[in-house]
Amino acid sequence: MNSIVHFIKVTLTVYIFSMFLYAIWYFFQVVDLAKMNPLDEWIGSLVYLPHGARVLMFCYFRYYSLPGLYLAEISGPQLIHHIDYVDGWSLAALGSLSSVIIAVEIIKWVRKNPENFSVVKTLSFKNYKSLILVVLISSMLNGILANSLIAIVNSSISIDVLTVLRFMIGDILGAIIVIGALWIIFTTLIDTRLIINPDD
């Protein structure tokens, strides 16, 4: 029973956090302050905040986070905007989530100790080095995986190198902004004694 309650709590937390980032990102994407996409083409955002949710939620909640993340991936575009991204986005969302899972497993494999390596063993994200590595690797993988799946399903969309690069850059910048904002918020709360530092 406790595991079911925990699963429900994690799913709701992940979904609400992801949708919050979708809402913020979509506002800036539509306003397009820098006028980077005047024709509203499928070229990828240069600052994609929801990738920060993918990385943080999976790194800290592990596989419990996947249902909430996937639900946000497929419902975010439809709930926040009245039209879906493109045909095949629900499949591309699997590629996006897989990119984070693969990135975490790659880091675990690189840092493995041959005597106690395990696929189910967790990786510590207490320092930001591992987290930033996950951001970089998953962004590169997502640029390739998501766009490849979209191109396979949707023949009307041509994916070029520029689109893939924009996905990579957008995911990296978006995730770093989210991580940086949360770091500032939580360190400020700890400094002002509004929350207790778990290390104390």
Image (cartoon, grey):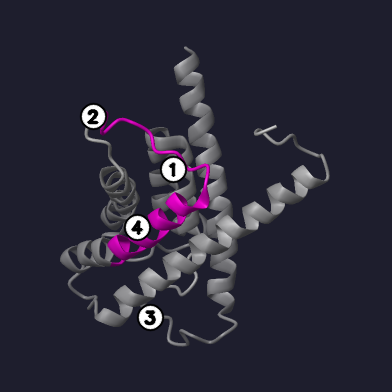
Would you say 168 lies left or right of 18 here?
Answer: left
* In the foreground, 19 or 63: 63
Q: CA distance from mark 4 to mark 3?
A: 24 Å
Would you say 8 lies left or right of 108 here?
Answer: right
Magenta segment range? 116-143
Percent of width and height locating residue 43: 36, 78
Is 33 placed above or below 56 here?
A: below
Residue under pointer 1: 59
| Residue type beneath disc 1 | Cys
Percent of width and height locating residue 28: 58, 72
| Residue type beneath disc 3 | Glu
Residue under pointer 3: 41
Label 1 sits on a secondary structure element that is helix
Which one is in front in this view, the residue at disc 1 or the one at disc 2? Answer: 2
Mark 4 and mark 1 lie on one chain; the one further toward the N terminus is 1
Residue under pointer 2: 115
Mark 4 and mark 2 lie on one chain; the one further toward the N terminus is 2
Percent of width and height locating residue 15: 51, 43
Point out which mark residue 138 bears. 4
